């Protein structure tokens, strides 16, 4: 039943679609909780979730730094691992957008381009998949906090993700959403941009932190770990008290662990 | 203008540290973006206008030779003269020759970005002419001896105090010795100085926003009316324009005009839209005796034939830079040449070479805001990425970045090693960060921290490891 080298959650069996979860390298390394939250939400939406073990990175570092051959090499690996699923779901607008862009890497390889397109057409960012494809209108979660939301650029502009997370957040018990001024302005992460031009990137993220603080929210949410690491890094440096989570963690009711960059709870604590 | 784009990194850091500049940039921030959004919201057909504009531009570029010939014929028919300049040198030489032949001494100019591009002012001054910019912003930066920092608001980087100082220093010779502090006073004083220049000028040079092929008409938009005075008062009018400015009909120009003002400043129309066709005819009460058009290629034809053709759709509205967070942080001078921001980051490497301007296409987060607002839908981030590809192929980028990317590529195309490696990395980093849950510094990762931020630590296990354990648990 499983594609070779994949591991299935199996619990969503019963006619629901088979979803391949592309967890992203950042979630894999930094924030497994985001992957687990994604699985939980997908299962609640009636999907069977599988995680191909041969997945790594979406290839954006190569793609956005001009190494198109390298990006194509990564893409082939991803296509081979994911093309047999009903859907490919990614808890990131940026990496999801990259998978959607795969056909462009194979302009001179029609066979691969066709496979890339077939997969791209079935690839979705997590939250928009839940709402737009699975028709999810509410979640069963409580989070009694004042939160604000940063619209990550790729999700917003390449995939049209704006209302979907807000709609679901609106059904979280106790959650109060304070809109962020300039929520559509880039936080300054930009992949390798943040280390190639750290001073400019630093100014952008410090502006973002100022806007976040102005909302008086306790928590910042977003849909892309790259942006969230950048913003959490800045908020942490400023010594503020705003905590940072991926939106999926809150929607899945799994934001009960320390936020990004928060001090770790002592062993034995809950 | 001698490009300084190779020094982008240093210049951007200076810009971030320049407190006066930051005051000016902060004051300008969001102003145009908010005004544009309002103007666009008020025009339901804005999106369909954009589609029409793209179609007009694409059709014209597809048949550029035809429309340029038609335009040139129409200009000649109306009594004007067309000059073809294939390079910046040609353009400078032609303009200087026309001014010499007319026996001019004093020249007024309307703001012209192509004039900046080819360096008209420098050539004219070298040839002994007095040149006065008449657009207020352009006049200010001429006094400051600086290039423009924005294509529609050339002095956006100047504060009121700096402008007051400039006027105080430069207007003494006209007997205007009072130091001014209020904006209306300063505008009045500039107007007073410029009025005499208009009347004394022998030649007026303007750019063009559009050239209409069917009638040989040149169109300029201004908010100060300086364009009208520059083209109608002197006895010679010279239009300098890039060859991509031509459009087939007046109707096409009006479609583009509806987008231009809204995209640039949020105005439905600019205060003045000036159409000029040929010299004064017998019976006309005013107008120039000679009408020249200098059509400038300067690399445009080669763009027509490669992947950057879409860039020739640009109508120079400045919306891309008004919405660019990088431009907003550092202003226009850091880019080191004539055109800043996203459109400049495409044009500059094409004009002065990737070796000189390789930083520009990289100094972008690919956030896509510029493409979202571009009235002629230029896919700016894609074009910037194409330039990065070219740079990569030419091996021009920074070596450590290249090596790092190659290492990451190898790592991520060996999934077993990736799984093990990330497992070790996640555990190690979590361990090293300890209770604090984040890093304030880390060897070999200095660039991240130079951005004034901590690095959150990983949770400790990779997702793949957690997942595999969970599946095994289920299986057993």
Image (cartoon, rainbow, N blue to C red):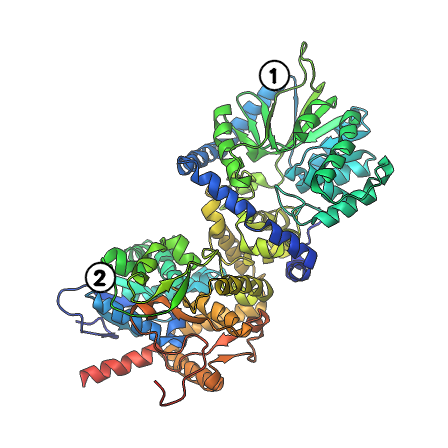
Query: Is disc 1 in the same subunit as disc 2?
Result: no
Q: Quadrant of residue A159?
A: bottom left
Examine the rendered structure and indicate whether residue A93 appears above or below residue B378: below
Image quadrant holding the C terminus of chain B, namely bottom left
Residue at x-position 55% and y-position 25%: B212
Q: Position of residue A188 (x, y in %)?
A: 52, 62
Residue at the disc numbered 2: A86
Question: Is residue B375 visible to us here?
Answer: no
Q: Position of residue B261 (x, y in %)?
A: 53, 36
Image-based side of B195 in relation to A45, left or right: right
Q: Residues within 10 Å of mark 1 (few under 14, many from 20)?
A: some
Residue at the disc numbered 1: B77
Q: Position of residue A152 (x, y in %)?
A: 42, 60
Residue at x-position 59% and y-position 58%: B359
Question: Is residue A42 visible to us here?
Answer: yes
Q: Chain of mark 2?
A: A
Count of numbered circles in the view:
2
Examine the rendered structure and indicate whether residue A258 appears above or below residue B69: below
Image-based side of A177 in relation to B106, left or right: left
Image-based side of B254 in relation to B227, left or right: left
Q: Secondary structure at mark 2?
A: loop
Q: Chain of mark 1?
A: B
Image-based side of B310 in relation to A9, left or right: right
Examine the rendered structure and indicate whether residue B201 appears above or below residue B394: above
Please tell me which residue lies in front, B328 or A244: A244
Q: Position of residue A138 (x, y in %)?
A: 25, 62
Please tell me which residue lies in front, B324 or A213: A213
Please tell me which residue lies in front, A199 or B468: A199
């Amino acid at each position: 039943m499983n594609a070779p080298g994949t591991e299935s959650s199996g619990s969503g069996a019963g006619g629901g679609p088979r979803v391949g979860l592309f967890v992203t390298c950042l979630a894999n390394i930094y924030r497994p909780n985001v992957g687990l939250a994604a699985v939980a939400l997908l299962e609640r939406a009636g999907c069977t979730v599988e995680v191909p073990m041969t997945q790594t990175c979406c290839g954006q570092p190569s793609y956005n730094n001009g190494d198109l051959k390298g990006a194509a090499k990564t893409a082939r690996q991803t296509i081979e691992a994911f093309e047999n699923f009903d859907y490919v779901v990614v808890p990131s607008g940026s990496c999801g957008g990259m998978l959607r862009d795969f056909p462009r890497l194979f302009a001179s390889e029609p066979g691969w381009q066709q496979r890339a397109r077939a997969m791209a057409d079935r690839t979705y960012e997590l939250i928009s998949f839940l709402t737009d494809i699975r028709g999810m209108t509410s979640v069963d979660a409580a989070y009694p906090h004042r939160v604000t939301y940063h619209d990550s650029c790729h999700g917003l502009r390449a995939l049209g993700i704006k209302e979907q997370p807000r709609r679901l957040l609106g059904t979280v018990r106790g959650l109060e959403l304070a809109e962020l001024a300039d929520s559509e302005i880039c936080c300054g992460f930009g992949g390798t941009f943040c280390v190639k031009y750290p001073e400019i990137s630093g100014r952008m993220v410090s502006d973002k932190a100022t806007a976040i603080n102005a909302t008086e929210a306790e928590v910042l949410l977003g849909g892309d770990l790259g942006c969230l690491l950048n913003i959490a890094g800045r908020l942490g440096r400023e010594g503020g008290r705003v905590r940072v989570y991926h939106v999926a963690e809150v929607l899945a009711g799994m934001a009960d662990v320390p936020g990004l960059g928060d001090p770790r709870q002592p062993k034995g604590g809950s | 203008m001698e490009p300084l784009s190779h020094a982008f990194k240093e210049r951007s850091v200076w810009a971030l540290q320049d407190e006066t500049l930051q005051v000016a940039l902060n004051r300008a921030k969001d102003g145009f973006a908010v005004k544009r959004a309002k103007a666009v919201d008020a025009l339901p057909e804005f999106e369909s206008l954009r589609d029409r504009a793209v179609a007009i531009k694409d059709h014209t570029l597809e048949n550029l030779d035809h429309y340029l010939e038609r335009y040139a014929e129409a200009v000649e028919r109306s009594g004007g003269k067309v000059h073809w300049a294939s390079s910046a040198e040609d353009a400078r030489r032609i303009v200087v020759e026309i001014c010499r032949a007319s026996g001019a001494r004093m020249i007024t100019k309307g703001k012209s970005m192509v004039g900046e591009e080819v360096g008209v002012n420098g050539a004219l001054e070298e040839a002994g002419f007095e040149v006065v910019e008449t657009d207020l912003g352009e006049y200010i930066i001429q006094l400051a001896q600086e290039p423009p920092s924005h294509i529609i608001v050339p002095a956006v980087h100047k504060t009121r105090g700096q402008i007051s100082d400039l006027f105080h220093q430069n207007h003494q010779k006209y007997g205007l010795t009072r130091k001014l502090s209020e904006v209306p006073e300063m505008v009045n004083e500039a107007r007073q100085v410029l009025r005499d220049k208009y009347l004394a000028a022998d030649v007026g040079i303007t750019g063009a926003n559009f050239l209409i092929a069917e009638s040989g008409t040149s169109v300029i938009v201004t908010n100060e009316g300086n364009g009208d005075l520059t083209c109608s008062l002197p006895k010679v009018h010279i239009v300098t324009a890039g060859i991509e400015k031509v459009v087939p009909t007046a109707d096409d120009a009006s479609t583009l005009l509806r987008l231009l003002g809204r995209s640039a400043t949020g105005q439905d129309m600019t205060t003045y839209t000036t159409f000029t066709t040929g010299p004064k005819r017998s019976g006309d009460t005013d107008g120039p005796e000679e009408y020249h058009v200098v059509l400038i290629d300067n690399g445009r034809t080669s763009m027509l034939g490669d992947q950057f053709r879409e860039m020739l759709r640009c109508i120079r509205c400045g919306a891309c830079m008004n919405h660019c967070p990088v431009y907003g942080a550092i202003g226009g001078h850091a880019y080191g040449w004539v055109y800043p921001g996203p459109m400049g980051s495409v044009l500059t490497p094409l004009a002065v070479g990737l070796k000189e301007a390789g930083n520009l296409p990289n100094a972008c987060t690919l956030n896509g805001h510029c493409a979202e607002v571009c009235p002629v839908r230029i896919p700016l981030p894609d074009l910037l990425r194409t330039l990065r590809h070219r740079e990569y192929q030419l091996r021009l980028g920074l070596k450590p970045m290249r090596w790092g990317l190659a290492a990451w590529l190898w790592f991520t195309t060996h999934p077993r090693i990736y799984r093990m490696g990330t497992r070790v990395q996640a555990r190690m980093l979590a361990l090293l960060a300890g209770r604090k849950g984040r890093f304030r510094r880390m060897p070999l990762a200095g660039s991240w921290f130079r951005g004034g931020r901590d690095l959150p630590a990983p949770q400790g296990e990779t997702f793949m490891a957690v997942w595999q354990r969970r599946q095994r648990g289920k299986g057993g």
